[in-house]
Amino acid sequence: MPGKLFIFSAPSGSGKTTIVQHLLKQDFKLKFSVSATSRTKRTHEIDGKDYHFMSAEEFKAKIDNDEFLEWEEVYEGCFYGTLKSEVEKIREEGDNVIFDVDVVGGTNIKKFYKEDALAIFIQPPSIKELENRLRNRNTDSQEVIAKRVEKFKFELAFSDQFDKVIVNDKLEDAFAEAEVTLINFLNQ
């Protein structure tokens, strides 16, 4: 029986990646969907583990051949996307697939897989808390934080297209709610 799909989407600073990493350590037979990109590989990255690296021309050819579930040109000539073949390989092995994607990508994957996929939106408790989390990371300028907050407002408008919204006020509670959500979906 093919595996199920768990799509996690959220604004930057919501805790989505932390929750996904937590779930990967639990016993849900989860495998992470490795994205494809046309950006240059960094020295510490491994092709097929961090990303599937390819040229922009190869990426565009795969777009033309309808090989992506979702894709985006983040900036000119730099593409990111989810290969259908990557997801199907995991599912055919009987494992479940977990995604850490933006809201547009998440809704596109959900539309493609319908009832085999559960789309989960991770939301911070408030815009103020999101700003605090982004500031406490000490990785972004005030300008970048302001842009991320504006993007959050855009992304929040997509939350009603997701099957489940988890408000990440306390991380341990969000972990527990995510685990229960996965268990319930796997038992359907």
Image: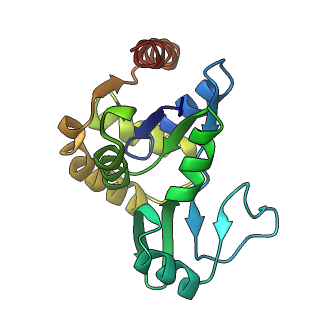
Q: How is the image coloured?
A: rainbow
Q: Is residue 31 left or right of residue 77?
A: right
Q: Position of residue 178 (x, y in %)?
A: 46, 20
Q: Position of residue 17 (x, y in %)?
A: 54, 39
135 vs 170, nearest the viewer:
170
Q: Is residue 110 left or right of residue 35?
A: left
Q: Residue drawn at (50%, 57%), measured in percent from left and top? A: 84
Q: Residue furthest front?
A: 1
* Quarter the N terminus occupies: top right
Q: Residue drawn at (52%, 60%), measured in percent from left and top? A: 83
Give above or below for 23 relative to 5: above
* Quarter the C terminus occupies: top left
Give above or below for 126 relative to 34: above
- Res. 187 image quadrant: top left
2 vs 10, nearest the viewer:
2
Q: Position of residue 128 (x, y in %)?
A: 31, 36
Give above or below for 135 relative to 40: above
122 vs 68, nearest the viewer:
68
Kindly tell me whether residue 111 is visible in this rendering. Answer: yes
Q: Residue drawn at (65%, 19%), measured in percent from left and top? A: 26
Q: Residue furthest bottom?
A: 57
Q: Position of residue 80 (x, y in %)?
A: 50, 67
Q: Residue drawn at (46%, 34%), measured in percent from left and top? A: 6
Give above or below for 93 relative to 173: below
